[in-house]
Structures are given as structure tokens and as C-alpha cells.
Amino acid sequence: MSLNRLVQKPHHKVGNISATTSPDYVELVRFLIQPFLDSPESLSIDCEISGTGKRAWIRIAFDSSDKGKVFGRGGRNIQAIRTVVAAAATAAGQSVYLDIYGSTATREGLSFDDDTEERLPPPKPREKRGNGHKPIARSRPR
């Protein structure tokens, strides 16, 4: 007797997702963003699905005091949230756009309006040392 006959194969029912159904984007975004918020009741989420069902627009708003936590260092948190939402949309055969009210962040990265944010001057380039050698460290007299 072979092993394959002894092992029972599980019966999984896999449902087909029709083109008219889409993920519950509102609950997915709420699940992903609420842990970052000090006041989760301030979270507002609006979702629109296009007439063809191929595109979804999600708009979120929350207290500006939570902005740093939601975006994360270098925008890592919000980018991870966008990636998860985009993966859910792709599985449903859709594309999704996540916009944040009160922010000028775009999908490509962060861009700030000149009127709302003070810009710092660009950093000065470091001066190159003469012949490419490292400076000699001198010991301090004690």
C-alpha cells in the first residue's frame, strides 16, 4: 500500500470572487490604521468604487497629532498600509488609491506645499581633504 492512499486529502471549498464584489476597504483600512491613533474615534474613512468596479478611491482623515505615527519614519507605515490595501485590490481585480485628508502626501512620496511648511536650506557639501588621506588623529596632552 502506498502512503498516498492512506493520507486523506482535505476538502477545501474555494469560492470564486466575482467582478462585482470588492474587499471591505473601510474595515481593512480601519484595522490597519487604528493601532497608530491615540484617538481612534477621530478616524474617518470614505470609500468610492467606480461604476465599472475596477477602481476604488479611499479617503481617510484623523487628528493631526497622530500624523507622525500613521506616516512613520520616512513614510514607512503609510507605505506598508498602502501595500496591503493594494494587494487586496489586486486580488479582487481592482486598483486602489489611498488619499489622506489634511496631508499633502502623494503615492510616490511626501511633498510639502511651500506655504504650509518651512523649508530648510539644502545641506552644504563637505570639503574634500587634499590628497585623499584621512587626517591624523593626535592625542590630547594630559
Image (spheres, rainbow, N blue to C red):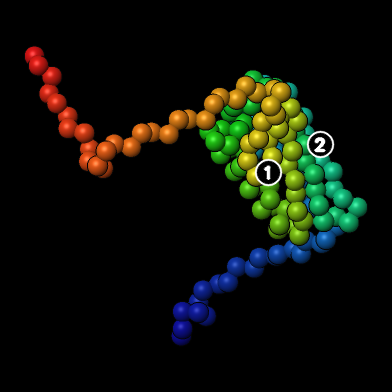
Question: Residue lying furthest right in this view?
Answer: 51
Disc on the earlier residue, 1 or 2: 2
Residue 46's disc is: 2
Occupied quadrant, residue 134: top left
Q: Residue at x 27, y 38 (%)?
A: 130
- Left/right placement of residue 41 relative to residue 32 reads right
Which amino acid, mark 1? Answer: Arg
**Furthest-bottom residue in this view:** 1
> Of residues 81 and 142, which is closer to you in this image?
142
Task: Tell me the quadrant of the picture where the C terminus can be found.
Answer: top left
Cα distance in 3D space between marks 1 and 2: 18 Å
CB contact under 8 Å: marks 1 and 2: no
Where residue 65 appears, x then y in whole percent? Answer: 64, 20
Q: Residue at x 53, y 33 (%)?
A: 73
**Residue 116 visible within the image:** yes
Q: Is residue 89 left or right of residue 129?
A: right
Secondary structure beneath disc 2?
strand
* Residue 56 relative to residue 71: left or right: right
Where 112 sits versus 1, above or below? above
Give residue 10's quadrant in the image: bottom right
Q: Kindly state the secondary structure of the residue where label 1 is placed.
A: loop
Q: How crowded is mark 2: few (under 14 residues within 10 Å), some or many (20 or more)?
A: few
Q: Could you tell me if residue 41 is visible in this image?
A: no
Tell me where residue 94 appears, x and y as whole percent.
77, 56
Q: Position of residue 54 (x, y in %)?
A: 82, 56
Q: Identify the residue at horizontal 91%, vertical 52% (top origin).
A: 51
**Labelled disc at residue 107:** 1
